[in-house]
Structures are given as structure tokens and as C-alpha cells.
Image: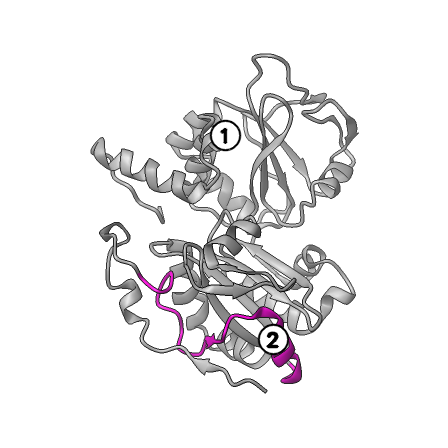
Amino acid sequence: MRKWFAIFGFALATAHHAGAQEVAPYAIDIPRWFTETFLDLREDIRDAARDGRRVMVYIGQDGCPYCKQLMVTNFSQRTIVEKTRKHFVAIALNMWGDREVTWLDGRSMREKDLARLLGVQFTPTLLFFDEKGAVVARLNGYYPPHRFEAVLDYVSGKQEQREPLAQYLAQAVKEPASPRLIDEPFFVRPPYDLRRKPGSKPVAVVFETAWCAACDELHREGFRRPDVRALLERFDVAQFPLGARTALTTPDGRETTAEAWARELNVIYTPTVAFFDATGNEVFRIEAFLRPFHLAASLDYVASGAHRSEPSFQRFIEARAADMRARGERVELWQ
């Protein structure tokens, strides 16, 4: 069996500010118990299976507050670290890195090219592979410790053979949260005809569930912000409970139900915010824990039309933050 080597010496990865133009080998200070391999994911998966473990691939970037939160908060908790080390081979990739990675089909490419191939828009992104190389869970963004630990239990226990991740989390994660969806004055009212016409605003469709702490936070901390509210005025905003049979007309003119549409869109996490342009096509999506700065950036990314010319949301965020600083505005990524 090919040996794995522990990663050392990443303290310098966070020694410089993201804007200092320093080239760091990894996104942030990776825990030393992460594994360094030759980055042939086919071999990594086979070797992990021989050990009775599965592969977890983390994709991050320098200066990412959510990546730091994952490492500092989640991976500072003993139970999470013990479960991850026992059941997984943890491999770190840099969203903008140049190391060669061999993908499951045998193609070799740079880390940044693999991130592009996988459609990585948020960091951290985590992929969990089974013994045959199938992705059994994908986390697009930061999950707080209690939800992240539940995902570890789901994948290590091979629960994907029994039920979808969203269904498992709904039962396994007990959170103090509202027993009903929170209404907002800017939500469109029934009948839900979301068809786009010439000159229509883009649509932001919010899928939520009851007892969802992250959904509550979206309303409490995100939708209350003046900058977010100003950007929301540039959208028609609709809210649907995940799994509801509410009748609606989709932005591209099809009659369906919220439940069927969510299944068609492969919505499995809440809250999910799907953005549709004036032609009725989905152009962007949020499906993880977002702080208000990134929520505002997501709205601006679509409302401004920047998604048409800049395919990388991360590059848009960097340019937007730089413009804000140039105007003398304070940029708080975690606020």
C-alpha cells in the first residue's frame, strides 16, 4: 500500500493577509493530521478502502473566513477530529492551486482546473467519496459543528444506502429553531406565477424548512441588513417550503409544485436560494451557511449581471471588496 505522509509546516499559510499577494501552498493553516498524497484520487480511494476508511476532499482558498471557521471551530472539537481521523482520509486542495491532480476518470489537471470542472463556487467545498469513487455527499460552503458532525456520521455509517442526506439531517440534527417558516414583506404572494417577461426582474427563490436554524439566521441576520434589503428590491423573491405541494409557475413558464420543482432542481439543503435571470434560466445558487457580506455579494452578483462576464463568484467577491475599500467602506467578511 502506498504510504501517506502527514502535512507539516502550514503555519505560514495564514501568516500573510489575503491581499498581500503572497503565494501560499494551501488556503489556510491545514491541521497536521490531514494527509498528503500523490493526488491520484483513484489510488487514494482504493488505499482508504483497504484501511476501512473513505476519502474526504477539502477545497479551500487563502483568505476564506468560512475555511478558517471550518478549521478553527469544527476541527478544534475533539469528537469531530476523532471521527474524521478514524473514518476518513482527509485531503486538502487549493481552489487556485497548480499541483497536478488525477481525477477519477484518469485525467490529470491542476487543482484550479479540477475546481472549475467540479463547479466550485463556494469555499470550503467538501467531497466525500465511497469505496467505488462515487460522491456520496457534497458540502458547498460552511456547516456549523453540529451539522458537520452529523454529515460525518452519515458518510462513515454508509447511510447513503438507506436515505438521502437531507432526510438524515432532518432527523439527526436537533437544533433550537422556529417550528414554522418566517415570512417577509418582500416575498411574492400567491398565485405564484414566476414567469419572466421582457423587462422583468431576476427571481430569487428561497427554499426552506421548519426547524431550520440556518434558515432562521438567514432571516434574522441576513434579511435584516440594510444593504441586503436594498439589493433584494432588485428581485422578485419567492419562498417555498421544501416538500410542499404549493402550485406555481416556474420562471421558464412550466406549471408544477414546489415539491416537484425542488426535486427537479436537486435542492437538498436548506436554506437554498436559487437565482433565475430575466429569461427564466437558473444562473446562480446559494445552498449553505452564508454571512450577510456574502449574501449581499451573491445578490449583487446576479442583480448587476456580473455573472454573465465573470464566471468565478470568488473573483467577483474580491473585486467587489476592493471597490468597497476604495470608497472608504469597511469590509467585514464574517459580519
Q: How many marks?
A: 2
**Relative to the observer, which residue lies in front, 35 or 102?**
102
109 to 250, vertically: above or below:
below
**Residue mark closest to the camera, 1 vs 2:** 2
Q: Position of residue 265 (x, y in %)?
A: 69, 40
Assign a secondary structure to mark 2: helix
Residue count near mark 1 (Cα–Cα under 10 Å), binned few <14, some 14–19, many ≥20: few
Relative vertical location of residue 57 with respect to residue 281 in this rendering, above or below? below
Magenta-highlighted residues: 24-52
Q: Decide whether residue 244 is among the magenta residues.
A: no
Which element is circle 1 on? helix
Type of amino acid at the residue the image marks with label 2: Glu
Residue 253, percent from left and from top? 73, 22
- Residue 132 location, quadrant: bottom right
Name the disc covering residue 43, or none. 2
Q: Is residue 125 visible?
A: yes
User: Which numbered disc covers residue 155?
Assistant: none
Q: Residue at x 56, y 51 (%)?
A: 117
Residue lying furthest top: 198
**Front-most of residues 120 and 261:** 120
Q: Residue at x 61, y 47 (%)?
A: 270
How far across and how far down the image is residue 15, in percent? Answer: 24, 64
Provide residue 65's location: percent of width, then percent of height.
37, 54
Q: What's the CA distance linking mark 1 and mark 2?
A: 38 Å
- The residue that mark 1 highlights is 308
Identify the amino acid type marked 1.
Arg
Q: Residues within 10 Å of mark 2 (few under 14, many from 20)?
A: some
Q: Nearer the viewer, residue 291 or 48?
A: 48
